[in-house]
Amino acid sequence: LVLAGWFVKSVFFKGHAISSPVVFADGQVFYINTSDDYQIYRMNPDGSGKAKFDDSTAFRLVADGDWLYFSGLELFKIQADGSEKAKLDNLWLDELAVGNGWIYAEEGQSDVSGITRRRTDGSQSEFLNNFQITNLVLDGDSLFYRNVDDNYALYRTKIDGTDERRLVDDPLDYTGLAVQDGWIYYANDSDSSKIYRVRIDGTERTRLSDDYASYLTVAGEWIYYSNGDDG
């Protein structure tokens, strides 16, 4: 299926239920397989070679270079080739994004809820705001997320927590948000979770797909997602 120059794939995950957007590292695709106790699997980009990668429990999974970061009952990082693994924190973090030497997360296990950041070695933890978010994505010097306290609208803020702004009024599906090359891709909950894209400044909002999409991610010219209309 080709849509406005973008190829949309939803066929790779038949037989594997996923709970987090797929990520790409070391030439492989990594994902959380809910059909096998929320463990991390990997496969080739063409969908072949599915195999278990790590048997830890994972609810959130992101990649930064050749490192994978995941949060289950604890926060870990692991090399994409499996050669090195380290525990970074005992906390279960609800959202994850990694870049620029920092791990960004949504933390709600204490009296304060909000976006936190800590170094990729687990040190120097601090809060950036104090409201509930989901769908956290890091791109360049900005964080993008779904603001639960504002009707699940799409927001953007700087990586230091300043210059926060609302970009579109659409309520986002809780499983679908990706950013690439100046575009934001999301599943629009007010339109049966169809895929939309919008510029990072909130302009040029366009619908791309009629599928019921979840757990979407973007790599190159491909949008990967789980198609709820396809069993």
Image (cartoon, rainbow, N blue to C red):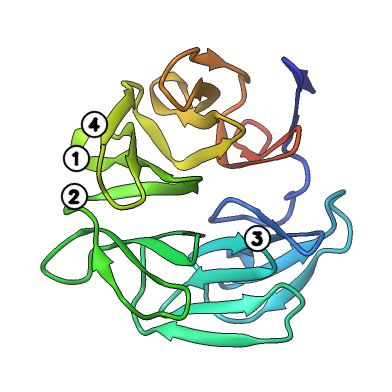
Q: Residues within 10 Å of mark 3 (few under 14, many from 20)?
A: many
First-in-chain label (4 vs 3):
3
Q: Which residue is mark 1?
A: 149
Horizontal side of residue 127 vs 55, given as left or right: left
Q: Quadrant of residue 215?
A: top right
Q: Position of residue 219 (x, y in %)?
A: 71, 42
Give how far apart the Cα atoms at labels 1 and 2 are. Answer: 7 Å
User: Residue 16, which numbered label?
Assistant: none
Q: Are marks 1 and 2 in contact (CB under 8 Å)?
A: yes
Q: Quadrant of residue 68?
A: bottom right
First-in-chain label (3 vs 2):
3
Give how far apart the Cα atoms at labels 4 and 2 are. Answer: 13 Å
Amino acid type for the residue under numbered disc 2: Phe
Q: Position of residue 57 (x, y in %)?
A: 52, 76
Please identify, in this view, whether the residue under mark 3 or under mark 2 is nearer the observer: 2
User: Residue 131, which numbered label?
Assistant: 2
Q: Residues within 10 Å of mark 4 (few under 14, many from 20)?
A: few
Q: Residues within 10 Å of mark 2 (few under 14, many from 20)?
A: some
Horizontal side of residue 124 vs 222, given as left or right: left
Give how far apart the Cα atoms at labels 3 and 2 are. Answer: 28 Å
Q: Which residue is mark 3?
A: 31
Q: Are marks 4 and 3 in contact (CB under 8 Å)?
A: no
User: Residue 151, which numbered label?
Assistant: 4
Amino acid type for the residue under numbered disc 4: Asn
Amino acid type for the residue under numbered disc 3: Tyr
Residue 77 visible in the displayed image:
yes
Residue 38 visible in the displayed image:
no
- Disc 3 secondary structure class: strand
- Disc 1 secondary structure class: helix
Give how far apart the Cα atoms at labels 4 and 3 are. Answer: 28 Å
